[in-house]
Amino acid sequence: MVAVSALRVVIVDDDEIMRTLMRRTLERMGFSQIYTSKDGDEGLELAQSQRPDVIISDYDMPKANGLQFLKAVREEPALAKTAFVMLSGSTNSVVRQRAEELGANTIIIKPVFPADLQDKLGALVQELTGSTIEWKPSLRRDALAPQDRV
């Protein structure tokens, strides 16, 4: 088992409100090493310096969009196997297919429900490391309000 507080997460989103909401949601789950960035270029530099376990990136961003950022992450040897979650407000299957082709581990359509995010993060960590996340008892999935969303 790996403690949720030991995992490093980088959030990349041009919307400051989304970054703040995602950070708060992750903190409620027990994550404590959370780094944020406003675009793909800055996000790549941040990921290179912090070596996160998980990257959560919006698709629709200026400069480098989520797909360009994902491609850059996968081309970086030190980050190539980092868990990558793509967030999108679009249900466009072309975007989804392209993200999968470039190596996104999962794509989540907005709005993001905390319990679903927790499930996906837990499954990703287990898939990539073979370890399950040790969620704090007060931060279990059932403690996250089902009506909450990011």
Image (cartoon, helix red, strand yellow):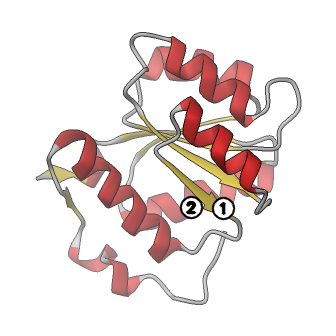
Where 103 falls versus 28 (above or below)?
A: above
Using residue 112 as the reference point, say whether residue 54 is left or right of it.
Answer: left
- Residue 128 rendering spot, x and y as whole percentages: 26, 41
Q: Residue at x 66, y 53 (%)?
A: 87
- Residue 29 rendering spot, x and y as whole percentages: 39, 65
Q: Name the residue under label 1.
A: 21
Q: Mark 2 points at which residue?
A: 24
Using residue 81 as the reference point, say whether residue 65 is left or right of it.
Answer: right
Label 2 Cα neighbours within 10 Å, binned few <14 / some 14-19 / many ≥20: some
Q: Residue at x 72, y 36 (%)?
A: 66
Where 51 falls versus 100 (above or below)?
A: above
Name the secondary structure under disc 2.
helix
Asked which quadrant contains residue 41, the reply is top right
Using residue 110 as the reference point, say whether residue 25 is left or right of it.
Answer: left
The alpha-carbon separation of the residues under discs 1 and 2 comes to 5 Å
Q: Residue at x 41, y 31 (%)?
A: 52
Q: Residue at x 74, y 46 (%)?
A: 95
Between 99 and 89, the residue placed more toward the observer is: 99
Asked which quadrant contains residue 77, the reply is top left
Name the secondary structure under disc 1.
helix
- Residue 145 rendering spot, x and y as whole percentages: 50, 87
